[in-house]
Image (tube, helix red, strand yellow):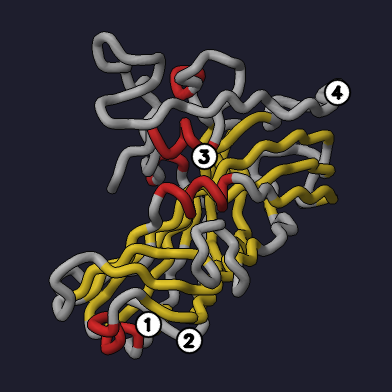
Amino acid sequence: MVTRRAWAGALLLTACGPDAAEYDYLRTERVEAAEGEGEGEGEGEAPIPDEPLEDWDVEGADPLSGIFAVETVVKAKLIIDLEARLVHRLRLVRRGRHVRQRFTLCDVELPSMTGVAELTIPPLLRALIQSIPADSEGDFLSSEAPVGALYAPDIPDVALGPEDADGDGQPGVTVTASAVLCEDDVEVYAALRIAAGVTGEVVDADTIAGEADPTLEQEILGWSDECISPAAALEVETMPGSTFVARRVSPDQDLDGNGNVSCAEIVRTRETP
């Protein structure tokens, strides 16, 4: 569904630390190329862009450093319980409590009500959000010892619009929408602000998990067909219970073998819940 109202989710810290075994959002096995196709390409899929690993100084970095795939589950409600999901790539270099990191939004699954209204992020918009990394640096860990440390990073927001942000000639960014009152898919033009506030615990060297306080603000600027206007009036209520898990990527997710696991590779190898 589409909403003109800003919505955000929050969750209070729990008394017990998370268990890594409870989190299994992202697959780690390799997605094989179809016979006769390029490396890492499946049938009908675009080639993986060649994105090299960030040229950062890693001398003295500890084993927590590396690339993580982060999935945030946003709890929401519109008559029935709904979920939105944010998928990020996290590259971090840790020295003691100090962390240098790049948090890149890879994909957004907007809350949808099947049979009423559904929104999807088209490839052009996905490529745009993947091109806007959010860099930050600071003492984001609560202790020198990584396991059990509180992880509370500063993650800059991603803002898109209201100008023609994705270069398709329409205001803001274009989201594809389907609704029960529309015979065909409709384009919705919106300005977006996406924030991924997280506070978690380092479960082990490969897992960080905890609570999320995400924000997804949408201002509808227009649409390609008036049939979507009733759905545009719907408002989503965000519910407590948003969570995130960051899992270290597997070498098998480096589909093009260039030494880096990019957003495109994380999305390609992601297991849809």
Q: Which residue is mark 3?
A: 69
Q: In 3D space, how far apart are the residues under numbered discs 3 and 4 (Cα atoms)?
A: 23 Å
Mark closer to the observer (4, 2) = 2
Assign a secondary structure to mark 4: loop
Give residue 56's quadrant in the image. Answer: top right
The x, y position of residue 60, in whole percent, is 85, 23
Disc 4 designates what residue? 60
Of the residues under marks 1 and 2, which one precedes in the sequence? 2
Query: Of discs 3 and 2, which sits in the foreground?
Result: 2
Q: Nearer the viewer, residue 196 or 199?
A: 196
- Identify the residue under disc 2: 5
Amino acid at dot 4: Gly
- Residue type highlighted by circle 1: Val
Between disc 1 and disc 2, the foreground one is 2
Q: Nearer the viewer, mark 3 or mark 1?
A: 1
Q: Quadrant of residue 199?
A: bottom right
Cα distance in 3D space between marks 1 and 4: 46 Å
Asked whether disc 1 touches disc 2, contact meaning CB atoms under 8 Å apart, the reply is yes
> Which numbered disc, 1 or 4, marks the residue that appears first in the sequence?
4
Q: Quadrant of the N terminus?
A: bottom left
Residue 10 can be seen, yes or no: no
- Mark 4 neighbour class, 10 Å CA radius: few under 14, some 14 to 19, many 20 or more: few
- On screen, residue 162 versus residue 117, left or right, reads right
Q: Residues within 10 Å of mark 3 (few under 14, many from 20)?
A: many
